[in-house]
Image (cartoon, rainbow, N blue to C red):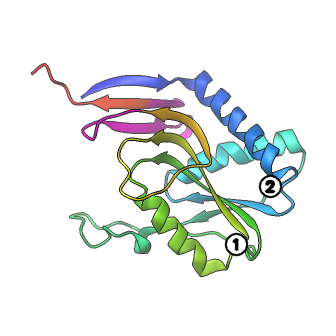
Amino acid sequence: MERQVILNAKHVELTVNRLCYQLIETHNDFSNAVLIGLQPRGVNVLTRLKERLEAILGHEVICGNLDITFYRDDFRRREIPLIPSATNIDFDIENKDVVIIDDVLYTGRSIRSGLDALLAFGRPQTVELLTLIDRRFQRDLPIQADYVGKTVDSLTSERVSVEWKELEGEDKVVLFTPDTNG
């Protein structure tokens, strides 16, 4: 597969920074807002946002992780079974403004699973979606992000990967395209 870097480390940093300021515009001091990252890859985006938000605001922002494994509609269809991750929501979401965070929005199915899983913890006042990458041409469900780092127009045969310095050695977003030359 051919690789094309669509966001390098500097662009990832600028994008995370911009998303933080967009969140602050809406949620001010986060006194009634919480951030919840979808396991596994949304948690990486959440970690970066949390670090930057707390540096800007000067106080802690309430965050949690949500495992959606058993809420996925493809849970029993996979050859290799999914391994659940830890959910960590040790705060009340009742009447809170919740921002669900994921790395890539594609079909919308993971977000639907996240919404189903979230409701097991209470009834939020509002729910918003933040995604680092929005692959806007292949929705299976009518789901749209409120905060988008970058929109990427891609084919079904292509894949977008968000890579992090802590896991893959470098912050970047890569578009993988099938090699058509051979």
- Residue 49: quarter of image: top right
Place of residue 118 in the rendered image (x, y in percent of width and height, measured from the top left): 58, 72
In terms of depth relative to the viewer, which is nearer, 138 or 73? 138
140 up-or-down from 122: above or below: above
| Magenta stretch: includes residue 154 | yes
Residue furthest top in the image: 181
Foreground pick, 96 / 49: 96
Measured along the vertical axis of the image, is residue 80 above or below residue 139? below
Which residue is label 1 attached to?
124
Number of numbered discs on residues:
2
Residue 159: x and y, percent?
A: 33, 38
Magenta region: 153-173
Residue 175 appears in the figure: yes
**Horizontal side of residue 130 vs 112, given as left or right:** right
Separation (CA) of disc 2 from disc 1: 17 Å
Disc 2 element? loop
- Residue at 48%, 36% in the rendered image: 163
Q: Residue at x 37, y 30 (%)?
A: 175
Query: Any mark on residue 61, and which?
Result: 2
Quarter of the figure that contains the C terminus:
top left
Residue furthest to the left: 182
19 relative position to 158: left or right: right
Callout 2 amino acid = Val
Q: Where is the N terminus found, in terms of image quarters?
A: top left
Q: Quadrant of residue 51?
A: top right
- Residue 67 visible in the displayed image: no
Q: Position of residue 95 (x, y in %)?
A: 77, 74
